[in-house]
Amino acid sequence: MFFMITGIQHFASPEWFEPIVPALLGDPTLWVLASGAIEMILGVTLILPRTRRRAGLAMALFLIVLYSANLNMWINDIPVGDVLLTTCGNILRGIAQLCMILLALWVGDWIPISRNLRVLEEDE
């Protein structure tokens, strides 16, 4: 649900996301709307059991690509809304991005933590 809500926000307030799109990519509105659509689609496919595994990997790869916007924000001191993140804030944002990547992989069953827990429960 988190990814679907974030995708919707790309359409509701594209101007909030536009400043962090690297200038090299061109029209920031296009990229904000495209990435919002992809987030919504991947969010839905993460929920569906039939598509969850592929969607988990696709979301992880998508989040890796999207990190370029976060790096652009950090390197070029671009504020998010009215807030300019400190170096610590940008590092925390990077950690959050890594956590989202790991979460997508876990939901897609690429990280077998749940299988390990089931084995432990069966042994007890």
Image (spheres, rainbow, N blue to C red):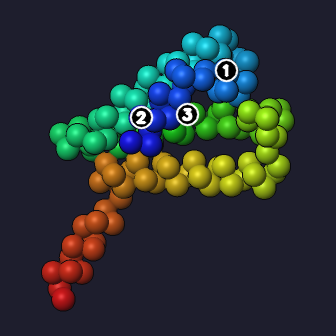
Question: Count the marks: how many?
Answer: 3
Which quadrant would the N terminus be assigned to in this image? Answer: top left
Label 1 sits on a secondary structure element that is helix
Q: Quadrant of residue 17?
A: top right
Residue placed under numbered mark 2 in the picture: 4
Instruction: Work out whether residue 26 can be spotted.
Output: yes
Query: Going by the image, does 52 lie left or right of 17?
Result: left
Residue placed under numbered mark 1 in the picture: 15
**Residue at the image point whose x is 43% and y is 26% from the top:** 38
**Residue 113: x %, y % from top left:** 33, 66
Query: Going by the image, does 107 lie left or right of 2?
Result: left
Query: Going by the image, does 84 lie left or right of 42?
Result: right
**Residue at the image point whose x is 48% and y is 30% from the top:** 7
- Give the CA distance from mark 1 to mark 2: 18 Å
Label 2 sits on a secondary structure element that is helix
Figure check: 96 above or below 75: below
